[in-house]
Image: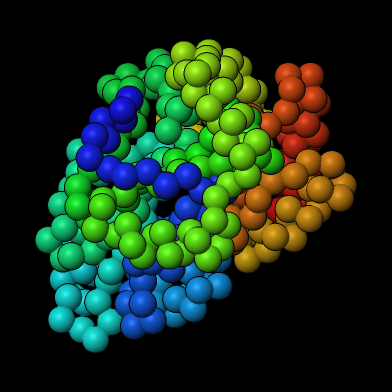
Amino acid sequence: MENGLKNSRIMVTAGANQAYTNLVISLLDGPHKSVLFKPYYFNHYMCLQMTGGADGVLFGDICERELTPDADWLERTLEEHKDSERPVKMVTVCNPCNPTGVVTPPEKLQRIADICKRYEAWLICDNTYEHFVYPSGEEEGVPDAVHTCLEDDHIVNVFSFSKAFGMMGHRVGYIAFPDCISESLFKVQDTIPICPNTLSQRVALGALSAGREWVEKKVESLHPNQQSMLQALSPLSEWGPVWGGSGAIYYMKKLPEKYSDSDAEVVDWLAGQHGVCVIPGSACGAPGYIRVCYANLAPGRFEDAIGRLETGLKELVAKA
């Protein structure tokens, strides 16, 4: 109810990844096309690959300035394919976005929803990081980010307990969906997990009783981590701005041009030589970038890790 979803049915799943898989199996048939926006969450694309829909994925870009999905491109693309043998039937928006760390403003999300409805495409909103939204700080003229959920008979919302409540290993997520797809979804659910294990569901109920206030206090504590991570990324400042900061728990940063086709090798090198783990942008459709996380270590270990990251990046730049 806190997200204003009053007419949706709920299905509890073994994590948000299983929720998304349920939806892909339920809503996409072989001939259909789907849309992901680059950089995308790698598990979304892997799900489409595993279910046979990889060749039907159309990749949209994000707007250069605000780093949110390009709605103009989406409108042109859906218009182009509306009468084809393989129409676009599903559009996925991760909000806040993994991997970019950017929140899609409510007005942009509403425009995307309106476009999808006009062209009879499903809109899947992955809200895994709904609690991780940050104020704009001291940046003049930049409004605070706002996360919103939309509800309609063509919109499905995905949620997770993993990040906000630190329940990654318990694997509990859920889908809020219109009743018209109940039969298909329950067939998939009964075939794959039937339900998440009972113990994890009880833990999730305990998390709900703690509520959003408990989560918001934890999220507020991430601000020093954000500042420290920005400092750690400063050796790469010559290669454009850092992406992210308004939502989720990630930043993305462009590597020197020398590494535009070898970000995976850079990741291996950072892990092997400096003991830090980051994600290659090529895994998310953004070669030449890395994704870093600032929320998965205790304060002492985090400071140690970002010190090693900064040292590694300085060495990397020196070799560029």
- Residue at the spot 77% in from the left edge and 52% down from the top edge: 319
Q: Foreground residue, 255 or 281? A: 281
Quarter of the image where one finds residue 228: top right
State whether residue 208 is above or below residue 252: above
State whether residue 12 is above or below residue 45: above
Where residue 280 sits: x, y (%)?
Answer: 64, 55
Residue 293 relative to residue 48: left or right: right
> Is residue 240 in sight in this rendering?
no
Where residue 258 sits: x, y (%)?
Answer: 65, 60
Q: Foreground residue, 106 or 190? A: 190
Where residue 204 sits: x, y (%)?
Answer: 56, 31
- Residue at the spot 78% in from the left edge and 55% down from the top edge: 268
- Residue at the spot 22% in from the left edge and 40% down from the top edge: 7
> Is residue 213 in sight in this rendering?
yes
Q: How many marks?
A: 0
State whether residue 312 is above or below residue 26: above
Where residue 241 sits: x, y (%)?
Answer: 49, 39
Residue 178 relative to residue 317: left or right: left
Quarter of the image where one finds residue 197: top right
- Residue at the spot 55% in from the left edge and 24% down from the top edge: 207
The way the protein has been coloured in the rendering is: rainbow
Q: In which quadrant will I find the N terminus?
A: top left
Q: Residue furthest left?
A: 118
